[in-house]
Image (cartoon, rainbow, N blue to C red):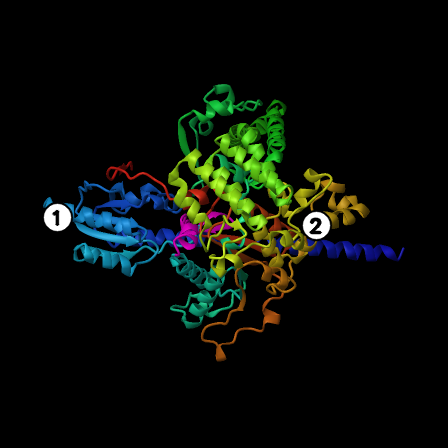
Amino acid sequence: MAAAPVASTSTSQDTVQTSRQTKVEEQPLDITVLKELARKALVDALNSVNGVKTLVLDNSLAGPLGLITEVALLKHHGVDKMFWLEPGPLSATTTNVVYLCRPKINFVRIIADQIKRHTREGQKHNYTLFLVPRTSTLVSRILEEEGVLGEITVSAYNLQFIPLAEDVVSLEHDSAFREIWADGDETVLYNSMLAFMTMQSLYGVFPRVIAKGDHASRLAKLLSKNLETSTPDNANNMLGTMSDKLDSLIIIDRRVDMITPLLTQLTYEGLIDEVIGIRNSHVELPVSLLTTPGAPNQAAGSSTTPQPQAGTSLAREKKKKHHLTTATDPLLGELRDLNFSAVGKKLNQVARRLDEDYKLRHQAKTVAQIKDFVGKLGGLQSEHQTLRLHTGLSEMLVPHTRTDIFNRSLEIQQNLLASYDINGQISAIEELITQEADIQTVLRLLCLASIVTGGIKAKVLENIKREILQAYGYNYLPLLLTLASPPLSALLPSPLPTSAPPSVAASKYPYTNLRKQLRLLIEDADPLEELENDISYVYSGYAPISVRLIQCVAQKGGVLSNPAGEKDKKVAGDDTKAGKGKDAAPPKVQAHPIVGWKGFEDVVATIPGAAVDIVQKIPGSQDGAGPAVSTLLLPKEQSTTTVVFFLGGCTYTEIAALRWVGRQNIGRRILVATTGIVSGKSMVESLADGGAVAAGPSEVGI
């Protein structure tokens, strides 16, 4: 009898603990303020030019601006017409002409040419140039050389982090990867530093900055040095306070893990990006998927889910841009991070639930019951439309996943990752060339083979390069040279020639050792059951190295063992608390303190690129000291946020894996920050840097 009160007390404590954990997890970092900052800065820039104005816009900024504002706001602040910034004459009907672009030389020369053309034609305008995200001495010098510096006012529009989702912010700088590792332009490092200084001014100073990779380490040191010399400029600036919302900033250099983006993404959102393409969170879809069916019986709430057209016919339809966001599409939040093999099952579950909800109308007998159903009808119709949208999207993806080249490519990737029959995989890549597979697919596989094996036999590589040039055209020669050149060094011969610089030899990737040390390949007898309990589910058995490195800092237990194994042990003794067997989710654990690379120093050291761990100091504090690390980094009662920054871009699969990591911890959320969203395809296209030049500025319909 004496045991009863103890059990009751224990139950009560469990309830309090659960309530406390729920309370902790209900405090996500408010990142909407970043959107408001960007929006206000744009309004202030436009208002600084009095009167009606013509806006000439860098095409690459249209997408980012669309995430923070709308055309109606631009019109409200004096924008009469909008044109793309393109070579050729500009037909401006207003006195004020406002240019908004990134500080690129070709853009500046176009602007100078248009100003000189107006001068020759006797047109008088007031010109203003807003550079994103900051002004550049080089721009002023070029304008001066062109003889138009005195005729144009140069200023800055400080566009920084833009929220893409509730836990993702991006600089939306699509060319960052190419600029850093192909062009040697490190401007994006400074711009990233400024963006993080803004973040610290809003939320407080990062207690710790951890980085891996040469450029990532430079950014970390630049950020810390800039913080030491800064002074808070007003009472609301948090630069003089150690953050109680952020526990650390982890910076990962894209060059540290080139393998992950080269692989085919297998999550729902990742596969959409691979097959259709997602740009600035928007995707171009057939109009029929975005319009609500007009049949009266469906509008009233049909219990039958409309069947979309076949994927091939959808692909031929007229396209319209659609914003992929959970704000208006909650179903996206349920689907986006699933392995594509599980999407069909999830859609079926949602369809059945909706069907049951629609059938409730037959049970409504009284006026109150009918009124209650009618009140729910709008929500049901909205869910019905989103279900129809994602069913159609899946139908568009399925034919692609069933092609011979897609599946052959996956097989080659899996074999390369397992270091199985490397010569056979090289031969398979050559077969894809003869089958005229997409050039991006071929180059991604070739670079993957080079990185995981430490280089392809020199004679074999030369033959493959020759085959590529003959099959796809000699215009790809510069791209092949870029892939082979340092610091990228993604396509190397083995052995390296004696003339190769030491930096190339040092960049060879220790994949075989990392595969074991970081548990990159998960080999389970029943993968569909087990892999959902590890980040490797996003690639059907392969764990992204970048996310494993982040786990080394923020979830050390996830690197050392599969949480599924721990879950099965706990569930075996109690099916009522955690579920039954393999269907249960891994148990959540209290987030451990951030202590840098501790415990994984040797593994991290084998990966090319510097590693740093900086404990930041509060500017202006006595002796430049900050709080003691032992007290600063212990888990707090309130939830904390760890910011993970991908310098050079990240994939949707990495975001999905980090969300999985975040769900396993109590007390720590993960905010993903990046220079932009990338895929293997977009990276290859960026390095190729192709594109036709338009004949002249085209008007943007507003």
Foreground of the two, 77 or 211: 211
Local secondary structure at mark 1: helix
Identify the residue shown where x is 61% and y is 55%. Answer: 551
Q: Is residue 437 above or below residue 105?
A: above
Give how far across and how far down residue 109 sits, in percent: 23, 50
Boundaries of the magenta span: 163-184
Q: Position of residue 531 (x, y in %)?
A: 67, 43
User: Mark 1 Cα within 10 Å, few/some/many (few <14, many 20+)?
Assistant: few
Using residue 551 as the reference point, say whether residue 221 is left or right of it: left
**Amino acid identity at mark 2:** Pro
> Residue 304's quadrant in the figure?
top right
Task: Find out whether residue 177 is within the magenta segment.
Answer: yes
Q: Earlier in the sequence, mark 2 or mark 1?
A: 1
Quarter that holds the N terminus:
bottom right
Residue identifier under label 1:
119
| Camera sees residue 552 | yes
Q: Which residue is mark 2?
A: 563
Q: CA distance from mark 2 to mark 1?
A: 69 Å
